[in-house]
Amino acid sequence: MNILQEVYFVLLFITLTLFIIALKNNVYYVKIIVLLITLWLLVSASAMLLSRVAGVKNNLFIFHISTPLEYLLICLLYRNVVENKSVRSMINLSIPVFFVLSILFSLFIQKPTVNNSYIVLIEYVILIFLSLFYLREILLLQQVTVLHRFPMFWISVGILFYYTGNLIIEGMLNYMINHSMELALRTYRLSYVFKYLIFLLFIIGAVCSMYPASVKNST
């Protein structure tokens, strides 16, 4: 395990621990974040164990499984907090559609031995839209009294930065894998910057969840 991975797992465990502590408040979004971070932990640990302990040369099938699960959890997160009924309906519809697309892409377009970049890019674009829409809603409709103490603000900013940064990396990754594996590895290492950033912003959100800002719902 290199230093980048060590820092990643340290931040992951800190973030997970804080949100587990925040579970005592019995808030829906905290439960979803705990499940999301647990998924990331299982995926990262499984991928590492398969490649380094079991000697599996290609562990990309794990990400074909985890991508729709990740999408499901973040959609459930936003479905619960977004006020706009049309957007909530779109989220509900997108979940089964995304699962079907993920299966079809894995079967016929980018099989489990190939990086599932197409479906990942679709996921990233949708999640970026949802995070931007919710941030707009926070500012215009929900009238958060103290924005820097509102947990979902920090969580949404983290999601926005993480998926925007990785959208660029993922968009180039398959091309670079085919042309230069060394360049692809260097580019992939850049993704750790966005992983660290989302954990740091999630940590702020976890701390703020103990004393959330009040929200006045729109009518």
Image (cartoon, rainbow, N blue to C red):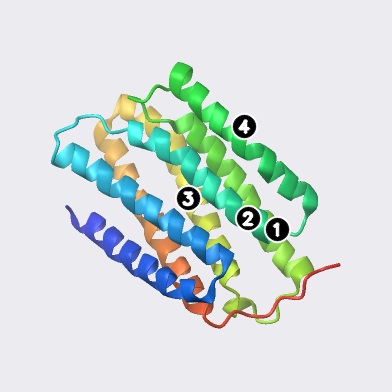
* Quarter in which the C terminus is drawn: bottom right
Q: What amino acid is found at the position of numbered circle 3 in the picture?
A: Gly
Q: Where residue 89 sits: x, y (%)? A: 74, 45
Q: Callout 1: 10 Å neighbours few (<14), some, many (20+)?
A: many
Q: What amino acid is found at the position of numbered circle 1 in the picture?
A: Val
Q: Distance between the residues labelled 2 and 1?
A: 6 Å
Which mark identifies residue 165? 3
4 or 1: tag closer to the N-terminus: 1
Q: Is residue 157 above or below residue 150?
A: above
Query: Residue lying furthest top in this view?
Result: 108
Query: Who is closer to the viewer here, 66 or 203?
Result: 66
1 or 3: tag closer to the N-terminus: 1
| For the residues bearing labels 2 and 4, Cβ distance under 8 angstroms | no
Dot 1 falls on a residue whose secondary structure is loop
Dot 3 falls on a residue whose secondary structure is helix
Q: Mark 2 points at which residue?
A: 78
Q: Name the residue under label 4.
A: 97
Q: Where residue 7 sits: x, y (%)? A: 26, 62
2 or 3: tag closer to the N-terminus: 2
